[in-house]
Amino acid sequence: MQKKKLAKLVIERLKEEYPKTQCTLDYDEAWRLLVSVRLAAQCTDERVNVVVQQLYKKFPDVASLAAAAPEEIEKIIRPCGLGKSKARDIQKCMKMLQDEHNGKVPDDFDSLLKLPGVGRKSANLIMGDVFNKPAIVTDTHCIRLVNRIGLVEQMKEPKKVEMELWKIIPPKEGNALCHRFVDHGRAVCTARTKPYCDKCCLADICAKAGV
């Protein structure tokens, strides 16, 4: 099957399966999503959502985090792992927002990539969820599923996967589709157990169904 046609079917079926998909990181301001995305590296979203509550009690805004000692941030975020590097990135990122962007998160991709601790995955998430702009977030669920389904072939490097998906996925669909990949990857097309192909809405069009 042509990959654009396959992508169209995948989008339609996952929309039906997960009509109300959304980011599983809790946030009410753009800068808080930036913080949570950095903390989520090698950590569950559920744990991040708990830890940030304590972080924001002590540091409730961009200015206070920008002025904080990384060691103080690290004490709070340690349960998320990689505390030292995450604390350093968060403090530097908030300081750059304060110094160069009037405390606001920029709404263009290249500016986001210049922020400490922000890579393509984080920048795409911000672009899609905060600013409603075209975005493709190639996290572990996305990469696993698109390889299994056959939208890409034997491709694991996030940027390469992203570039291939841009060729076959309508820009307006990318962000929500990647959230649905997370939903489907957690519920059905799992990583740590055998995928539940018998209850998968994509089984008849998936290249690896039953394998």
Image: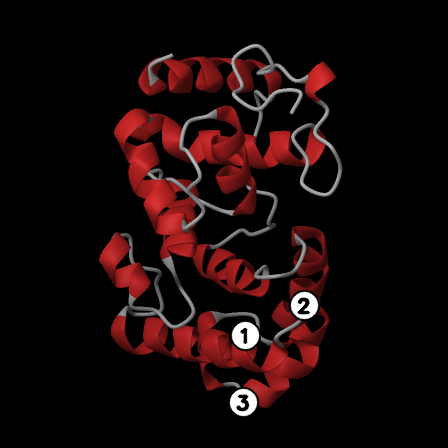
Callout 3: 10 Å neighbours few (<14), some, many (20+)? few
Number of the label disc, if any, that sits on residue 184:
none
The location of residue 88, given as percent across then percent down, is 50, 81
Q: Which residue is mark 2?
A: 80
What kind of element bears circle 1? helix
Quarter of the view holding residue 163: top left
Q: 28 or 43, which is in the foreground?
A: 43
Q: Secondary structure at mark 3?
A: loop
CA distance separating discs 1 and 2: 9 Å
**Alpha carbon of mark 3 to alpha carbon of mark 1: how far?**
13 Å
Question: Which residue is labeled 1 in the image?
Answer: 86
For image coordinates 69% across by 20% down, the residue present is 197
Residue 181, by quadrant, is: top right
Q: Are the residues tagged 1 and 2 within 8 Å (C-beta)?
A: yes
Vertical order, 145 against 28 (above or below): above
The residue that label 3 is drawn on is: 69
Report, in whole angstroms, how far the alpha carbon at label 3 lies from the one at label 2: 18 Å
The amino acid marked with disc number 1 is: Lys
Q: Residue at x 64, y 71 (%)?
A: 55
Q: Residues within 10 Å of mark 1 (few under 14, many from 20)?
A: many
Q: Quadrant of the C terminus?
A: top right
The answer to whether residue 177 is left or right of residue 49 is left
Q: Earlier in the sequence, mark 1 or mark 2?
A: 2
Residue 161 picture location, percent across and down: 38, 42
